[in-house]
Amino acid sequence: MVDRETVTTYSEKAGDYAALGCNRGEQNQLNAFLALLPAGGSILDLGCGPGFHAEFMMNKGFAVRAMDATPAFIEAAQARGVDAALGHFDDLSDVAAYDGIWANFSLLHAPKDKFPHHLAAIHLALKPHGVFYLGLKLGKGEKRDSLGRFYAYFEEVELRDYLQQAGFTNITASYGEGPGLTGSIDKFIILTAWRA
């Protein structure tokens, strides 16, 4: 189920969000993720925003599909040449379709009680030995930020449990911090995991 307040906020701030661009840290994360995939492999950008990550991956020779719940982001991604479609996490129904799934700070907008369901769908959508990239903010509980966006916060231990229960293996994690749309500096975690 789409959180309408979050989508409305992103629609109103789409230009500001797009202006953030793809920074050097994200480019490094993208390159590390792409290095785990077969050349020219298929990728789903789940929660693609304005499409700058999908465009980066396309420019590296990968076949990229993208999905987001914000119409303004889909328009921006399509303007970049991205195969982007309007959709929510609940709409993911592909089976063994992708070598990699990139979910960069998108699943944190879904309620925690839906997280296992979304991970199961992602696991099913990956090809055997496919790679899942997950970026989330660190913390506990659920709340809205100063812009009204819904957030679910996680810690590494619970994330590892969720991923293992969904069937993922070879889970690795790294940490960082950086500014978001509100201007605050937030701590985050990046995980990669493999479909067995």
Image: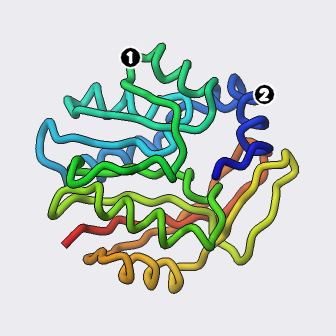
Could you say which is closer to the camera, residue 91 or residue 134? 91
Q: Residue at x 30, y 74 (%)?
A: 168
Position above or below: 171 against 21: below
Label 1: how many Cα within 10 Å (few below 14, some 14–19, many 20+): few
Amino acid, disc 1: Gly
Which callout, 1 or 2, points at the residue further toward the start of the chain? 2
Position above or below: 194 against 9: below
Label 2: how many Cα within 10 Å (few below 14, some 14–19, many 20+): few
* Residue 142 figure quarter: bottom right
Q: Is residue 193 left or right of residue 13?
A: left
Determine which of the numbered discs, if any, sits on residue 81 in the image.
Answer: 1
Distance between the alpha carbons at the discs numbered 1 and 2: 22 Å
**Which percent across, then down, holds residue 85?**
46, 29
Is residue 51 visible to the viewer in this orientation of the structure?
A: yes
Q: Quarter of the image for the C terminus: give it.
A: bottom left
Amino acid, disc 2: Glu
Q: Residue furthest right?
A: 146
**Which percent across, then down, holds residue 171?**
33, 75
Circle 2 residue: 12
Could you say which is closer to the camera, residue 118 or residue 181? 118
Q: Residue at x 47, y 62 (%)?
A: 118
Q: Residue at x 66, y 65 (%)?
A: 111
Q: Is residue 51 left or right of residue 170?
A: right
Q: Residue at x 87, y 50 (%)?
A: 146
- The kind of secondary structure element at disc 2 is helix
Question: Is the residue under label 2 in contact with that under label 1 (CB below 8 Å)?
Answer: no
